[in-house]
Image: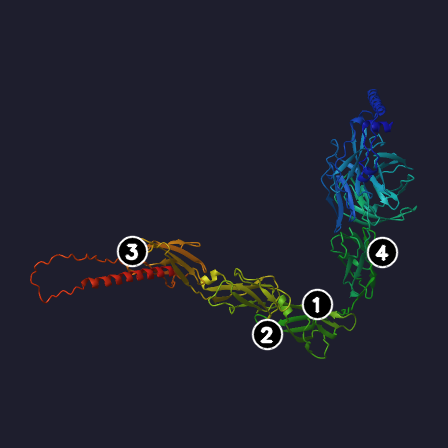
Amino acid sequence: MNRMRRIFAGAEPAALTRQEQRHSPPAPRPTRKWAKVVAAAALTSVMLTAIGVPGFGEEMAHAAPAPAPVSANFPCLTPMIFVAQGNNPDGSGPTQLQSESYSLGQAQFTPIGTPWGGIGGFNKYNAIGFNTADNFLYGIANSSDGVNPNYHLLRIGEDGAPQDLGVIADMPTDSRFINAGAFHNGTYYVMSGESSAPEIFSIDLNTVTATTTTLSTAWTPADFTQVGNYLWGVEKYSGTFYRLDPTTGAVTTFPATSTFWNGNTNASAGAAFTFGNGNLGISSSDTGVVSQVKITDPGSAAPTFTLVSQSAGPQSNRNDGANCVPNPSNTDLEITKTGPPQVQTNGTINWTLAVKNNGPAISSGYTVSDTVPAGVTGVASTTPGCTVNANTVTCIGGTLLVGDSSTITLTGTAPPTDGTCVENQATVMANESDIVPANDTSALVRTCASTVVVPPAVPALSLVKTADATALTTPSKVGDTITYHFTATNTGNTPLTDVTITDPLTGLSALAYTWPGTAGTLAPGEKVDATATYQITQADINIGKVDNTAMASGNPPTGPPAPSKPASTSTPLTAAAALSLVKTADATALTTPSKVGDTITYHFTATNTGNTPLTDVTITDPLTGLSALAYTWPGTAGTLAPGEKVDATATYQITQADINTGKIDNTATATGKNPAGEAVPSGPSSTSTPLTAAAALSLVKTADATALTTPSKVGDTITYHFTATNTGNTPLTDVTITDPLTGLSALAYTWPGTAGTLAPGEKVDATATYQITQADINTGKIDNTATATGKNPAGEAVPSGPSSTSTPLTATPPVLVVPVVDPPVMTPPVAAAPVNPDLAYTGVAGLVIIPIALLLLLGGIFAFVTSKRRKSES
């Protein structure tokens, strides 16, 4: 019937793990037959509810909700004690999960997460237990629909938020309050400490189902926990101890011990948990006091109960406990005790107890117990966490990390009788399992009372060391000397022999001692002075100081050597990082005048002129076109020790711009880093290399006379061609060609680039025309000269040499006019006038003119032929 109730009520099992999900078979697909069964079951449920069968309908109305997202589990890396209790001292309010730790005799509770929000308005849970299989806490929430109780299984992770896994099937129906729970060998057991029913329930976490185990007799502990192979608990008000074997149901009771409650019989037991050392822990609901009880032989018929410690804690009327113990949880606590061998009668005895954790695990806390013999009175301790009951001192310590120690001091008044001796020892118990129990008890300490007390020998030695740095230079340099002064004084009450001062500084000279008496011996109050010198090294300068420590030691008459405390000095050194650079230019490969592509070789030398090494040393020259620097390092590339230098070379081919400027100026710098990583620059190093500039301009002029006629005539044209060339190594501007020939046309230029400008090697062509005149023909030729000029980059005029042409012209031949003489006409003589007898007619005039005309004709022909020949030659 209960199985049917769970099916119909929709109760769900606990959520499967991922591994379980991977290995679980797929859910069967519903068949028509199964659908009919479900429908019939549903109808049956309705009918049973209608006729009033208990349990139906209510459980369906309280079906388990879908599980909330699961938080991470508890890592349990250190021992932890958990207490779930009401948020208010009277037990009211929602349940708050807390962790419990110890500090100076006080149990401290730290909230984990926030108070629980609850299920349907019910916000309390109890019966928590820690499952070592998954490192989750589990608890029970009691709720009710007003008719029947519902018990919800909760799972709680490290965020303190419970996850509802559903209503537990097969739980009792008498509304009993489930308030006690614990895991025993992997099984979760719960019960009601307020019910007289002799039964306990084991919960299957997978099916969320309860199995009832009938007990041999009723047991009503407020809570229970596993100690040994049993479940142990304490009855809430009587203090009776209960032991249960859950496999058989056998219950055994043991009478209460009133001292467990500090005589307060009204104190009620509450949460139960197990310490890592296997002891039973009980938290009082009324007082909040946490008691640690050691159960010796927990499975025997007559186990013994020992109260180990009690710590104050917060009070709550409703609490429950659990614990996790890491694996491994072993620790090793060691206790030592020291005290004086002799004191004055009725004097004060001072004992010192030291607890040390030797590991391997952290200890969550410990209890120290020391019972002082009865002969000592006024036993007391000022150490927090310690209490004194009669002559028994109990101290509760907190968390102790591996390697840490804790000190406890005790005092008491010595016996009044001379010669009375007392001896005792202390013990320590860790909250965890202790793997070396032999050192849990200290050695016996014996102290005797005496009327005459001989002060114990107290050997002591002090040392003072100083450094005299007046001989150091600034900045410091290797070999500078520091003088150390030492003074060792016997500050004890016993003589010391074999006194020595030790200073491990490498390179320190031998100490020169000045003894007050016998070498190596100091009586109480005596002192010895010593000096030593040290020459500083480069390593010291690099560090920037010289630190060293000395110690003195001497041997008392008995016992171990008496060392002094260390005496140290720190002597600062002045570091001065510096770097220099020298740069030179080798211009021997330059031509005269300079030309583009000529090479300059630069040489650089960077020197560490400081007293610290330099790293990342580089030389930088920003000259555009400079080749990469080729370094020659003295050792490791980039590193220069003090005094070391690095050489480097680079080449540069000059450009037209350099020639135009007339020189090459440039500056290089070097940089490095001191031991602190700070930049150390050199000063700049510059060179100026002059270049030879040679501005020059040439001009070639020709005359094209092919258009002249023969003979030449006025208006014939001559075409002149001009070529001006920049034959220097600097550019020329304002280049012009000048031809003073009157009547010459304007020159037409053909520039290679910008008009008026010629780079070295460039040329400009120009043409002009000229029409000859009668004067030129009369002269028979045209002679003229042209020149070119420009300006160098300095603006100075650069003329070319003159360029001339001479163009011959052909003159027209002369025309010879020969007079024609008519033959004489013979007429009769006429009587003539009388003739002057002085003018006699000879008759030869015509004969003279003819030869002259012939000569002129021949001369003209000769001139014409000559002119033609010259023209063809030109």
Is residue 135 shown left or right of residue 697? right
Measured in 3D between alpha carbons, the distance from the residue under mark 2 to the one under mark 4, in whole angstroms, is 61 Å
To which residue does mark 4 refer? 437
Q: Residue furthest front?
A: 828
Quadrant hosting residue 348: bottom right
Q: Residue at point 18% right, 64% down?
A: 844
Tag 1 and tag 3, C-beta contact below 8 Å = no
The 10 Å Cα crowd at callout 4, few under 14, some 14 to 19, many 20 or more, is few
Tell me the number on the disc at residue 471: 2
Q: Look at label 4 and name its amino acid.
A: Pro
Q: Look at label 1 and name its amino acid.
A: Lys
Q: Nearer the viewer, mark 1 or mark 3?
A: 3
Measured in 3D between alpha carbons, the distance from the residue under mark 1 to the one under mark 2, in whole angstroms, is 28 Å
Is 290 or 340 nearer to us in this picture?
290
Q: Residue at point 87% right, 27% down?
A: 1
Residue at disc 2, secondary structure: loop
Q: Is residue 234 visible?
A: no
To which residue does mark 1 refer? 565
The 10 Å Cα crowd at callout 2, few under 14, some 14 to 19, many 20 or more, is few
